[in-house]
Every structure is written in structure tokens, then in C-alpha cells.
Image (tube, rainbow, N blue to C red):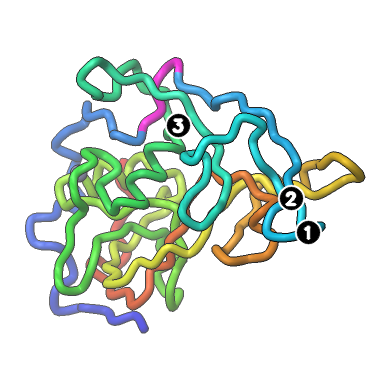
Amino acid sequence: MLTNTTASPRLPGHRVHQEPREKSVVPYIALRVGESPVAKQLDLELRGGPGTWGLAYADEVPDDRDSHDVLWQRYHETRDCAGRVTGAPVAGRVHPGRLRETVSRLTCPVCNHPADKTDDGYLFLVPRAKSRIEAPLTTWPPVCREHATVHARDRPDLRDGYTAIRSADPTLHGVRGRQYRRAGTAFEVARRDARMPYGHAQQRWIVAYRLVRRLTHPTVAIEAADAAR
Ligand SMILES: [Zn+2]
């Protein structure tokens, strides 16, 4: 149930209508020049029982699947010898692996430090139209207070304004990815952007590229902030 906290319409210290302080900051999740998908050969494999086919990589390693046994698209990363992400950012693009990491660990997409959390939960930004949904789904991580405006500026889905909400229990819901189907002894693409909740029987046919959380028990922290420019 949404609760509009009109007594406290904006976060203390949060500059909704002002320019971001760090205009030049490169978000942790930004795609860098030279980063691209890892080419992996897909194969058919018996999964879960006799006659139950699904996808696997020909040279699959344990890190290719998550704890729900879903197969993931892998991406190259450019990091320096200290482990820091390096290279020029590619405008308007995110690195799916680092985005997944922040959604999984509930860290800020800009600085990769723990996202802001109060007794009402983690701080998420959702499109204004989604703010009245009981428990919206999101493929974006929560943010820290300092980078909320910077992150909003980078999100194409927030161009028409956004609402900052808190979710006390942002549960892992599933994935988005490319779904395949069996075609004789091979397979073919069934849906290029499929949404698949964890536990679904068809998840063995998907190669995931986005992690999805459901923002349960949301409360509104900032009502309908303007889009950041
Ligand atoms: Zn941050």
C-alpha cells in the first residue's frame, strides 16, 4: 500500500530541482569503450529430468548461472590493475554486468557504495506513472542520497519525472532476457525481451541480461520530482 508522506515531501538535504553537484562523475554502471558481450556458444542440454531440454553454454562455468539456475549473458570488463573500472564512458549505455551487481548487492549505481536505507527501506527512483503501483518491478538499483539526482538524469525512463520511493523489502523477482525455444534438434529466438519470474518452467530457455526486483511495501519519499536535466 502506498503511503504519501506529505508531512515530509522531500528528503532532508536532497536537491530535487538543482543541478547535480558532480556533473562530471562517471557512474559505476556506465559502459566503457571496449566493453562488449562475451561470445559464448549456446547448446541444448537435458535440464531437470528426462526429456526436459534447456539452454547451456558449450563451455559453461559455474559463474554463468545465478543461484536460481538461470543462464546469464556475460560481458567483458575493462579494469585497471587495482580493479577499478576504466576507459571512456559510452554515452547513454550501461554495463549489464555491473548493473546486475548493483541491483543484487543494493548498492548505488553511481558510486557502488551501499544505497541509502532508513527504517522505511532502500531509496529507489521510479517513473512517475509507476509510483501508484502496489509493488512495482524495477531493473534499477537503489541509490545513495548524494547521487539520486545524477542517477535520475541518466535514466531514460525518468525523463518525464519520477517519484522517489522506499521499499523495506525489495525482493528478487526474476530476470529479463532473450528467450529461446526448441526447433527440432536446435533452437530459435522466441522473444527478444522476455520477462521471467524466478521459478517459472520456461526459465531454462532464457539468457538473462537484467535482474528484476519487486519493490514491496513502498512508501513515497519524494512525490513526483521533476526530471533531472
Ligand atoms: Zn552513490
Say what amino acid the circle numbered 1 marks.
Pro
- What's the mark number on residue 46? 2
Mark 3 lies on a secondary structure that is strand
Horizontally, is 181 left or right of 140 in the view? right
Left or right of residue 199, residue 9 in this image: left
- 224 drawn magenta: no
Distance from disc 2 to disc 1, alpha carbons, whole Å, reads 7 Å
Closer-to-camera residue (149/213): 213
Q: Name the residue under label 1.
A: 50
What residue is drawn where x is 27% and y is 72%? 168
Pointers 2 and 1 in contact (C-beta within 8 Å): yes
Q: Which residue is drawn at 34% across and 50% down?
A: 227
Q: Residue at 54% x, 42% y: name it.
A: 72
Q: What residue type is labelled 2?
A: Leu
Q: Nearer the viewer, residue 99 or 183?
A: 183
Query: What residue occupies the far left of the structure in this picture?
Result: 13
Q: Which residue has dot 3 on it?
A: 93
The x and y percentages for residue 132 are 42, 75
